[in-house]
Amino acid sequence: MPWIQIRYTTDKQSADLVSDEMSELGAVSVTFLDAHDTPIYEPKPGDFILWDTTIAIGLFDAEIDADAIIEQLKSFPFGNKGQYKVEQLEDKDWIREWMDSFKPIQFGQKLWICPSWCEAPDPEAVNVILDPGLAFGTGTHPTTSLCLKWLDQQISGKELVVDFGCGSGILAVAALKLGADKVIGIDIDPQALQASEANAERNQVTDKLELYLPENQPEAQADIVVANILAGPLRELAEIITAYVKPGGKLAMSGILESQAESIHQIYSQWFDLEPTEIEGDWCRVSGTKKA
C-alpha cells in the first residue's frame, strides 16, 4: 500500500516532542535522521544520540490529510521552528527492496560473504552465508571488512582462533570456513552469542565453535586472535587480549578510528611486533605478531 512521509527538520530539544505528536496524529512510525550527516563513533552503552539539527520522519497512511496534520503540528510550541516536507512513497515490495540492497561481497582472495537469497558468485570460493540481522557485523562496515581481509590472508588451516567480541559471529564463521580447526567466541551480549550460534549452524560449523560470556571464558593460547570491538575496550582489556595470543601468534584489532591508532600502538607494541596500520574510511586495523 502507498504511504506518505512527513519530514520535519527540528532541533534535538524538540525532536521527542515532534515524535510524540506525530504518533498522536496517526503516524505508524517515526524515525530520526541527522540533517548534516554527522558521524557518531563511540556512544556510551544505553545512549540514544540526537543531533543538533534532527529530521523527524513520520510515516502515515496515504489517505490522511497531510496539510491538516502539518497545521496541527504548527499549533504546538515547537511547530514553527523548522521546515516541513511531504513525500509520497511508491507502493513497492519493500522486503524485496531491502533484500536487493545486500549483495555478495568478496574479501581478499578466497572469501565471500553471501546473503542466503543470493547465489554465490564463485561456488569454489570460501562462501559464508550471512543475512543482516541480530548483532553487529555483516561485512559492510569497514571494521568488519578490515578483519575479514586479514583473516583471508592469515589462515592456512588447523589454527586455534579467538574472536574477542564476536557479535554476529561473522569473523568466527569466516575463520572456520577458511580452515581454522577451532574458534572460541567471546561477547558480553547473550543475544550476540545466539546470533553467532545461528550463523554457525547455517554454515555447518557449530561443532568447531565454542561461545562464552566473559565471566565464563576459558584460558587459551591461540594461533590467531581477532578483536573487532572499540578503542576503549581494547585499551582496558589489553592484558586479557594479549594473554590469548601464543608467542609467535597473530593479533588483529579493529573498531579503531584512525585518530586512535597511535594510542593502541603504544599499548600493544610492548607485546607485539606491529605492522603498518591498515585504513578504510575513518576506521583502521592494527595487527601484529606476538614477541617470543
Image (cartoon, rainbow, N blue to C red):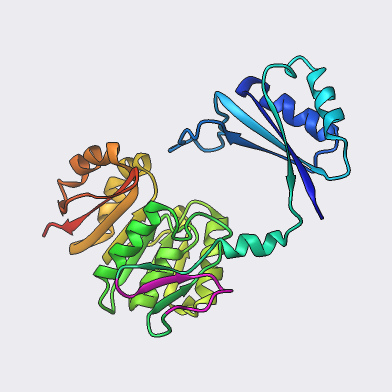
Most extreme residue toward the bottom is 124
Pick whichever, 139 or 161, lies toward us: 139
Looking at the image, can residue 95 be seen? yes
Question: Which residue sits at x=87%, y=39%?
Answer: 64
Which quadrant of the rendered structure holds the N terminus? bottom right
Q: Is residue 251 magenta?
A: no
Residue 150 image offset from top left, x and y in percent: 28, 63
Residue 273 image offset from top left, x and y in percent: 13, 53
Question: Which residue sits at x=53%, y=63%?
Answer: 102
Read off the magenta span.
Answer: 109-121
Residue 264 image offset from top left, x and y in percent: 25, 42
Pick whichever, 252 or 184, lies toward us: 252
Pick whichever, 163 or 7, lies toward us: 7
- Position of residue 61 relative to residue 193, above or below, is above
- Position of residue 209 relative to residue 261, above or below, is below
Most extreme residue toward the top is 77
Question: Which residue sits at x=29%, y=79%?
Answer: 158
Looking at the image, can residue 220 be seen? no
Q: Is residue 114 magenta?
A: yes
Residue 272 relative to residue 163: left or right: left
